[in-house]
Amino acid sequence: MPDRYQPLYHWRRTKLDENDEPSDSDWCGYDGDIGIGRIQLQEHGPTKGKWHWAAHGPHVRHRHTPHTGYEVEGREAMRKVEEYYHALMAANGLKGSKQ
């Protein structure tokens, strides 16, 4: 059995405000204070049971795609976000703290 992906950055349950109860189906990733992306387990529709990932990073000049997608496993969605973040930083002559 292959090893599960071990995220490089800090991931925590999304909390929108002080009244929001975080869940295991919605996570945000951070490189220090920089938000690198978010993953959410889809609960309805044709993507039900898949993890939607959306990657971002600091304000930089050069962006690329794809920056969103779906994965079967949450850790694989985290991997997609982290890979995008590394590629984004490299395209702008920068490095993330875990590169």
Image (cartoon, rainbow, N blue to C red):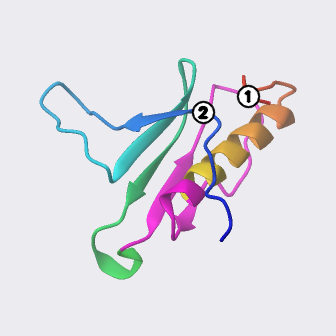
Picture mark count: 2
Residue 60 inside the magenta-drawn segment: yes
Pick whichever of labels 1 and 2 is earlier in the sequence.
2
Q: Which residue is mark 2?
A: 9
Quadrant containing the N terminus in the rendered view: bottom right
Could you tell me residue 37's position as x and y percent?
53, 41
Q: Residues within 10 Å of mark 2 (few under 14, many from 20)?
A: some
Task: Tell whether label 2 touches label 1 (CB within 8 Å).
Answer: yes
Horizontal arrangement in the rendering, residue 45 relative to residue 17 (left or right): right
Which residue does the image show at 85% across and 37% down from the upper left? Answer: 91
Rendered location of residue 30, percent (x, y): 54, 29
Query: Vertically, is 63 above or below 77?
Result: above
Residue 69: image quadrant is: bottom right
Q: In what element is the residue under mark 2? A: loop
Given residues 60 and 79, the one toward you in this image is: 79
For the residue carrying disc 1, how many other residues have a C-alpha within 10 Å: few (<14), some (14-19), or many (20+)?
few
**Residue that sits furthest to the bottom in the current view:** 46
Q: Position of residue 44 (x, y in %)?
A: 27, 73
Numbered tag placed on residue 60 in the rendering: none
Magenta-tinted stretch: 49-76
Which element type, helix, strand or loop, lies under badge 1? loop
Q: Which residue is mark 1?
A: 98
Q: Residue furthest left?
A: 19
- Residue name at image x 41 percent, y 76 percent: 47
